[in-house]
Amino acid sequence: METIKAPRGTKDVLGDESWKWARVLSVCGDVARDFGYSEVLLPIFEHTELFSRGIGDATDVVEKEMYTFLDKGDRSITLRPELTASMVRSYLEHDMRRAPQPVKLWSAGPMFRYERPQKGRYRQFWQADFEILGVESPMADIETIDTSMEIYRRLGLTNLKVLINSVGCPKCRPAYREALKSFIESSPGGMDSLCETCRGRLERNPLRILDCKNPSCKEMTESAPAILDSLCGECKAHFEDVGRGLSRIGADFRLDKRLVRGLDYYTKTAYEILAGELGSQNAVCGGGRYDNLAEAIGGPRVPGVGFASGIERIVITLEGQGVYLGEKPKTEAYVVTASDGLAIEASALTHELRASKIPADTDYSGRGMKAQMKHASVLGADFVCIIGDDEAASGTVSVKNMSSGEQRSFIRSETASRLLSWKEEQNR
Ligand code: ATP
Ligand code: MG
């Protein structure tokens, strides 16, 4: 029988890598705490309708990328492709409008999109998602950008590009949509230079053409009018405030007139953060404002702004930039015994070391002392605690420093505290 492999587009994150994920997620948690976001744990599947209404039928995600199925009760269920719609659903469902505004939420976990797997693009991938709900102020937009940049700063990432744009609002966007359509229709080559997907988009969702990665679509829209020139007074003022606020906190950002979200409930600010190390999957973060999304999923109007950052892409960028994340967690002390008869003693000493927060391990397979010493060095243990026959008889433990070779003898009951002092002595 053929052995079963993980499905295409998924991957096992193993020990050599998973500790880096833990670091990234713990930095996300620290930044969330310092910026006042509280964590919410949301379901991995939702009613399909939440996404078809909350992301939009005319988006790639909903049209082509969702994992949708009927459950045993004939409900249409979808594995979440992103978190914003669930966040807003949760806000509405728990009536968070009654709490003081804004409500700041964050969450991290796996998302699912049926995409063509490539470096930095998977069918199951993790996002950390941060949202500020209930306020219209451009200061909230600035804060979300600052939140993501603070995560990258604390992780030691550099050379990130922040691109921002405004997508206007339902008041000013229709005129831009028409201007863009007539620009494309009247350009030499016009419709023929668009890819098939974009030809379909021209009627349904023309702004998305600006976002197309196909070179001929890019070329044809190179000199298309910019949405910034069509913004209404309110959107323009909002955009200028975001720019001023970002400059004031020293954020390095650039305008990108191609950055769009095609749907009506995405409003005003849209941004992306790019890292060169990622190749063509170059976005570590995508975010923006969505003042009409709560209404689209059947609630009252709740303005909101936020971002999602891809954890795999952060890890790839960290590795590409050679960022030092500290050392991989390892066993510090390994307990070695002379004979099987001392196994219980070894297990008890290991227990005591761990209780004193010394990462410790021991042998369970009755290997000889030499093999145990070898295992200790494979695990990278700094110290080996030896309970030989002599030590057992005298109620002591011989502790050897694996790098210097120095050996000390401790009274059995004091081993953990003496070892802690030795560690401190070394770190001085
Ligand atoms: P892209 O243009 O790369 O497809 P997107 O616009 O679909 O990105 P968003 O929906 O804004 O991405 O998601 C936010 C972030 O989640 C992205 O910036 C990226 O870091 C990450 N991400 C999105 N899709 C994937 C995927 N299939 N695999 C890994 N990470 C992803
Ligand atoms: Mg995508």
Image (cartoon, grey):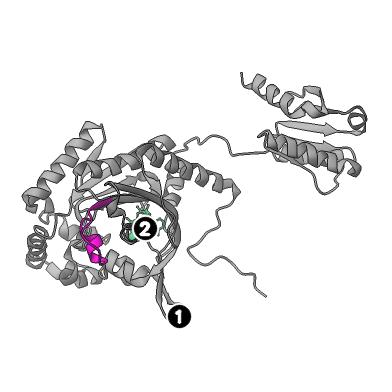
- Using the image as rendered, state which of residue 107 and residue 166 is in the foreground: 107
Residue 298: say if magenta: yes
Amino acid type for the residue under numbered disc 1: Gly
Residue 196: say if magenta: no
- Using the image as rendered, state which of residue 97 and residue 312 is in the foreground: 97
Q: Secondary structure at mark 1?
A: loop
Q: Is mark 1 within 8 Å of ligand 1?
A: no
Label 1, residues with CA under 10 Å away: few <14, some 14-19, many ≥20: few
Identified at 65% across, 34% down, the residue is: 357
Q: Main secondary structure of the magenta part?
A: loop
Magenta residues?
Answer: 291-305
- Answer with the quarter of the image where residue 113 lies: bottom left
Q: Is residue 284 visible?
A: no
**Residue 377 shown left or right of residue 239 in the figure:** right
Residue corresponding to mark 2: 83
**Residue 324 shown left or right of residue 335 in the figure:** left
* Residue 162 at x, y percent in the picture: 28, 43
* Residue 314 at x, y percent in the picture: 42, 46
Identified at 15% across, 45% down, the residue is: 239
Q: CA distance from mark 1 to mark 2?
A: 24 Å
